[in-house]
Amino acid sequence: MTRTAKLNFAYKYPNRKWICTDADALQYGRQLTDTLFEFKDENTEATLVDITEYEAKEIEHTINAYGYTQLKGENKAKGLENIEELYGKSTNWIIAECIFEMEFSK
């Protein structure tokens, strides 16, 4: 999906509910598809995060900073928790939120 198509999709569904993800930072997010999310906070305009645009290594590096891993077993010794075991169906949301906070939030 091109960036323009993603923006059109976001504007096509303006009623998708924004959910407060961090009250202290006035951060909000909403899920547009299984892998496309939109986040904003008090200092950042609404930003699209499509997790399919990130390689597995990039995602792993980003979520490691929050204490998560997508790997199983061997990383538990490092103190990282498996993100899928922890969040189940919400895993993509958490990954997208971590990407937003690391790359876009001011």
Image (cartoon, rainbow, N blue to C red):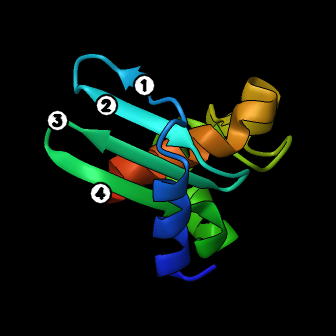
Left or right of 48, for residue 54: right
What's the mark number on residue 104?
4
Task: Name the image quarter holding residue 78.
Answer: top right
Q: Which residue is drawn at 74% across and 25% down?
A: 86
Residue that badge 2 annotates? 27
Q: Nearer the viewer, mark 4 or mark 2?
A: 2
Residue type at numbered disc 2 = Gln
CA distance separating discs 3 and 4: 12 Å
In the image, what residue occupies the spot 31% across and 31% down? 27
Tell which tag, 3 or 4, sits nearer the viewer. Answer: 3
Q: Do the residues labelled 1 and 3 touch (CB within 8 Å)?
A: no
Q: Is residue 84 left or right of residue 79?
A: right
- SS at circle 4: loop
Q: Earlier in the sequence, mark 2 or mark 3?
A: 2
Tag 4: residue type? Phe
Q: How many marks?
A: 4
Going from the N terminus, do you reach mark 3 or mark 4 first? 3
Q: Do the residues labelled 2 and 3 touch (CB within 8 Å)?
A: yes
Q: Residues within 10 Å of mark 4 (few under 14, many from 20)?
A: some
For residue 76, say whether it is visible. Answer: no
Residue plotted at (40% across, 22% down): 20
Circle 1 residues within 10 Å: few <14, some 14–19, many ≥20: some
Residue 50 location (% of width, % of height):
57, 63
Residue 42 image-quadrant placement: top left
> Residue at label 3?
42
Q: How far apart are marks 1 and 4 (CA)?
A: 15 Å
Q: Residue 58 at what x, y percent from top left?
A: 56, 68
* Tag 1: amino acid: Thr
Tell me: 73 left or right of 94.
Answer: right
Q: Mark 1 points at which residue?
A: 21
Q: Earlier in the sequence, mark 4 or mark 2?
A: 2
The amino acid beneath tag 3 is: Glu
